[in-house]
Amino acid sequence: MELKAFVKVGLVVFLMGLAATTDARYDSSSFITQVLTNGGANYRVKSTSTACCDNCVCTKSDPPQCECHDVRDLDCHSGCENCVCMWKYPPVCVCNDVTDFCYDKCDSSKANNAH
């Protein structure tokens, strides 16, 4: 019984020490705060790059339904609401949004990680 109490006290002291040394400041611009787990197969990332698309495909319906089929490293364009990245190294991401328009073409000299 004494061993269990000793282990519990040791664990509490360890956790208190860990909490005291942890930086509790929230930084919304860090990469880890932009990643949300989604099952285990992929994750979502919010980009800070300009919204653009080089490979936009639209239906002929009225209004059209458009999707950007650009594949990018680590993130999607900033206008993307549903960015899905494949769990591999480096992660490649595709925007799964359906809109009624296409974004402007990306300037290849300024595009952020565009393929």
Image: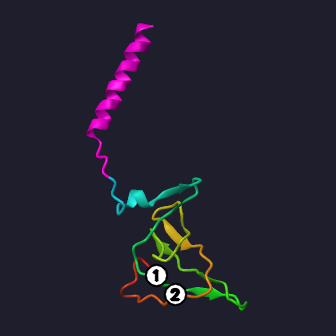
- Give residue 28's position: percent from left, percent from top: 36, 60
- Give residue 21's position: percent from left, percent from top: 26, 39
Asked if the magenta segment contains residue 71, the reply would be no
**Residue sitting at 35 percent across and 60 percent down?**
30
> Which quadrant of the rendered structure holds the N terminus?
top left
Asked if the magenta segment contains residue 22, the reply would be yes
Q: Is residue 42 left or right of residue 74?
A: right
Q: Is residue 101 left or right of residue 35?
A: right
What residue sits right under mark 1 in the picture?
A: 51
**Residue sitting at 54 percent across and 71 percent down?**
81
Circles 1, 2 touching at the beta carbon (< 8 Å):
yes
**Residue sitting at 41 percent across and 8 percent down?**
2
Specify the principal SS of the magenta part. Answer: helix
Q: Is residue 37 left or right of residue 23?
A: right
Pick the front one: 65 or 42: 65
Instruction: Count how many numbered circles sit on residues in the image.
Output: 2
Whether residue 89 is situated above or below residue 23 in the rendered picture:
below
Marks 1/2: CA–CA distance: 7 Å
Name the element at disc 2: loop
**Residue sitting at 47 percent across and 84 percent down?**
52
Name the element at disc 1: loop
What residue sits right under mark 2 in the picture?
A: 103
Give the residue type at disc 2. Answer: Tyr
Pick the front one: 63 or 42: 63
Colour style of the rendered protein structure: rainbow
Give the residue type at disc 1. Answer: Ala
- Give residue 103's position: percent from left, percent from top: 52, 87
Magenta-drawn segment? 1-25
Q: Is residue 26 left or right of residue 35?
A: left
Outermost residue on the right side: it is 61
Outermost residue on the top side: it is 1
